[in-house]
């Protein structure tokens, strides 16, 4: 198969997105897949939308785009996220860019690969976490899901978690600096969480994405000027916590 790059959760962070695209340009990638949440939280929704529209072969709907399009989306977001969603809606409306996200779907299948924003079970909203919390799938449940649900597809790429991991029927692998390349067999069932470009939450502030060529999954980390993004968030009047967390990777 062709070599692809899979990005997710840009969250209106133009500095991170530009750094990631520059890295991708040097990797011999043939197509970029974006798994949603290009907007929300950050200060540059218009530029990030236009850039992903221009560069990505596939763009999925994330829960933040869904909330921007549906003002009565309910109470699934914390107050800072809600404030940013209302701010984003206003800005995209003014720029005439809501059409840019109105046709997106939260998942799609290409041959044996499912691409989803959230999870294979709930493409828009479900998080995958290590410990049991209501409304979340645990890692054990994910391994069961690989056994039971991965029938019409063998591989599932997800975003939404903001933390990179690779799950096989053998167990979980968390990529890190010394271990970021994984050789996989052509028969293996894989759950691949690609991490977040614009708001990583695994304690590493660098932007995160993955590449896949059919036999190797590689996680990439890219430093970017998060102080610039944080300053823009503060100047825009968005919640200060959204600026502060970028330096922490949380
Ligand atoms: Fe997200």
Image: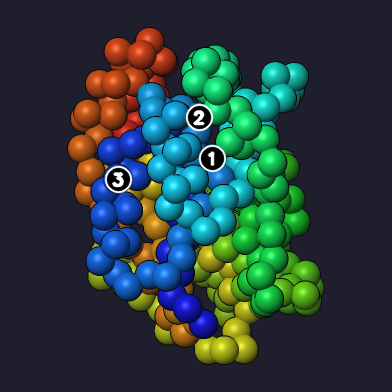
Asked whether, in this view, residue 224 is left or right of residue 11, the answer is: left
Q: Earlier in the sequence, mark 2 or mark 3?
A: 3
| Residue 245 badge | none
Give the residue at x 69% y 41%.
103
**Residue 226 is drawn in which quadrant?**
top left
* Residue at mark 1: 37
Taking the spot 57% from the left edge, 63% from the top edge, the residue there is 157
Q: CA distance from mark 2 to mark 3?
A: 17 Å
Q: Which residue is pictured at 61% across the width and 37% down the height?
A: 101
Q: Is residue 19 above or below residue 242?
A: below
In this rendering, the label closer to the viewer, 1 or 3: 3
Along the line of sight, the residue nearer the viewer: 170 or 30: 30
Q: Quadrant of residue 37?
A: top right
Residue 30 x/y as whole percent = 42, 70
Q: Nearer the viewer, mark 2 or mark 3?
A: 3
Q: Position of residue 47 (x, y in %)?
A: 39, 33
Q: Point out residue 234 in the picture as x, y percentages from the top left corner.
A: 31, 15
Q: Secondary structure at mark 2?
A: loop
Distance from disc 1 to disc 2, alpha carbons, whole Å, reads: 7 Å
Is residue 127 visible in the rendered structure shown here?
no
Q: Is mark 1 within 8 Å of ligand 1?
A: yes
Would you say 206 lies left or right of 208 here? left
Which residue is identified by label 2? 40
């Amino acid at each position: 198969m062709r070599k692809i790059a899979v990005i997710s959760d840009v969250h209106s962070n133009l500095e991170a997105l530009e750094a990631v695209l520059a890295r991708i340009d040097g990797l011999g990638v043939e197509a970029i897949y974006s798994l949603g949440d290009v907007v929300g939280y950050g200060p540059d929704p218009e530029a990030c939308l236009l850039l992903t529209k221009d560069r990505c072969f596939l763009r999925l709907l994330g829960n933040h785009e869904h909330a921007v399009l549906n003002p009565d989306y309910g109470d699934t977001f914390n107050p800072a996220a809600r404030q940013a969603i209302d701010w984003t809606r206003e800005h995209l409306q003014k720029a005439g860019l809501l059409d840019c996200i109105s046709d997106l779907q939260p998942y799609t299948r290409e041959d044996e690969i499912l691409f989803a924003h959230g999870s294979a079970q709930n493409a828009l909203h479900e998080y995958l976490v290590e410990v049991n919390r209501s409304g979340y799938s645990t890692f054990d449940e994910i391994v069961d899901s690989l056994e039971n649900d991965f029938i019409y597809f063998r591989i599932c790429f997800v975003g939404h978690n903001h933390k990179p991991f690779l799950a096989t029927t053998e167990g979980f692998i968390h990529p890190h600096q010394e271990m970021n390349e994984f050789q996989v067999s052509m028969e293996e069932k894989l759950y691949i969480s690609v991490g977040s470009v614009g708001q990583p939450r695994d304690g590493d502030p660098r932007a995160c994405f993955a590449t896949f060529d059919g036999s190797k999954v590689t996680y990439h980390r890219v430093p970017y000027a998060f102080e610039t993004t944080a300053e823009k968030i503060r100047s825009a009047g968005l919640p200060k916590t959204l600026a502060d967390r970028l330096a922490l990777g949380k």
